[in-house]
Each structure stands twice: as structure tokens, then as C-alpha cells.
Amino acid sequence: MTLDQKQQNRLLSPVHSRFDLQKRTKKVGVTGKYGTRYGASLRKQVKKMEITQHAKYTCTFCGKDSVRRQAVGIWKCKACRKTLAGGAWTVGTTAAATVRSTVRRLRELTEA
């Protein structure tokens, strides 16, 4: 088989062999763009932040998984087009959860 015939067979074949596919990252994921720079521990922290930052979140108004980050602290639901204020990396923050539970507790005390 000549080289031209191998190339033609590869182009005509609908299923690619395992060796034709590009090798992907094993551990680094989105932080592969940093290469070996900055140290493993810092890259792991950045990986965690970037994954939470780029993830889709559930909208509290419509219930769909379509809330995406627009800028630091600004989140927008693509389905109902509501804009939310939240944390820099995630929609909800621990401080916001604490305030929400405190307000709920105080509201229950005043009603009782």
C-alpha cells in the first residue's frame, strides 16, 4: 500500500482509529494553557475556579440550567433573560447564604 492509498482509506473511512485522534489532557483540563508555569498547586486552584466560573447554573426564576457568567459578579439567564448579581466565580456566595438564613430566621421570629 502506498502512502496515497493510506491517506485515501483514512479519508474514506467513517471511523477513525485510536491513533488518528488527538491526545487530550489527563489531569490539567482547562489549565493546560499555562503549561508547566506557576506550580501545580496554583494551577489546581485556578482549575477549580475556572470550572465553577464557566459552568451553567440553575436559574432561581425559571428553573432552567441556563445561568452563565457575563462579568465579575454579573450572571445572566439565557432562557428568561434575567440578570442576577452574585459572586465572582459562582452565582451564590457563602456570605449571601448566611445573610439569607439570618433574614429568614429573623422574619420567623417577628411573625411568631
Image (cartoon, rainbow, N blue to C red):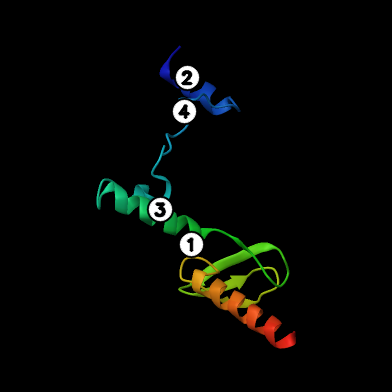
Q: Is residue 34 visible?
A: no
Of all residues shown, which one is farthest toward the bottom?
110
For the point 69% across and 68% down, the residue is: 79
Tag 2 residue: 6
Measured Cα–Cα span from mark 4 to mark 2: 12 Å
- In the image, 98: left or right of 24? right
Q: Earlier in the sequence, mark 4 or mark 3?
A: 4
Tag 3 residue: 47
Of 33 and 83, the residue lying toward us: 83
Q: Earlier in the sequence, mark 4 or mark 1?
A: 4
Q: Residues within 10 Å of mark 3 (few under 14, many from 20)?
A: some
For the point 43% across and 37% down, the residue is: 24
> Which mark lies nearer to you, 3 or 2?
3
Of 35 and 43, the residue lying toward us: 43
Which quadrant: the C terminus?
Answer: bottom right
Which quadrant: the N terminus?
Answer: top left
Measured Cα–Cα span from mark 1 to mark 3: 10 Å
Tag 4 residue: 20
> Which mark lies nearer to you, 2 or 1?
1
- In the image, 74: left or right of 48? right
Is mark 2 in CB contact (under 8 Å) with mark 1?
no
Tag 1 residue: 53
